[in-house]
Image (cartoon, grey):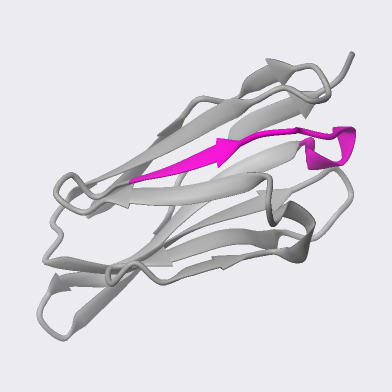
Amino acid sequence: QVQLVESGGGLVQPGGSLRLSCAASGRIFSVYAMHWYRQGSGKQRELVASITSGGRLNYADSVKGRFTISRDNASSTVYLQMNSLKPDDKAVYYCNAVGEIIPSHRFEDWGQGTQVTVSS
């Protein structure tokens, strides 16, 4: 009932930048928080950044100072600005949203993932 559509991945050289977007649509009453996760080849999925409806931010230590998460509450869209990209940032990036479809009916959904490759 809730769809998350990601965009913005691609190939970039080390030191470059990319901006990921994730738009939530469907039956949504409210969104508590939106997150970006990533999963590298042979690695576990890890939380990269989070933003709550109140604007509280959280980042993985590995991306602090380089990545910025932001959100447009009106359109339920979350962005991840990634600067100073490193080869270790190569992964499939997933958007995650948690909220309510109607009051007291919680949802949690994932996007399909978008590939980010950092290579010279």
Q: Residue at x 15, y 60 (%)?
A: 28
Farthest residue toward the front?
A: 65
Q: Which residues are magenta?
A: 78-90
Q: How many marks?
A: 0
The quadrant in which residue 41 appears is top right
Of residues 32 and 109, the one nearer the viewer is 32
Can residue 113 be seen here?
no
In which quadrant will I find the C terminus?
top right
Task: Find residue 113 and report its image quarter.
Answer: top right
6 sits to left or right of 29:
right
- Whole-percent x, y for residue 98 in the image: 35, 69
Q: Seen in the image, is 93 located left or right of residue 45?
A: left
Q: Is residue 88 magenta?
A: yes
Q: Position of residue 57 (x, y in %)?
A: 48, 67
Report whether 61 appears left or right of 83. Answer: right
Query: From where the camera sits, is residue 88 visible?
Result: yes
103 with respect to 106 (left or right): left
Residue at 87%, 33% in the rendered image: 87
Q: Is residue 55 above or below residue 80?
A: below
- Please provide percent x and percent y for residue 34: 40, 60
Coordinates of residue 80 in the picture (x, y in percent): 51, 42
Depicted 78 relative to depicted 46: above or below: above
Q: Is residue 105 above or below residue 63?
A: below
- Give the residue displayed 59% in from the left and 26% down from the top: 18
* Residue drawn at (48%, 50%) of the image: 69
* Quadrant of the rendering where the N terminus is positioned: bottom left
Residue toward you, 15 or 73: 15
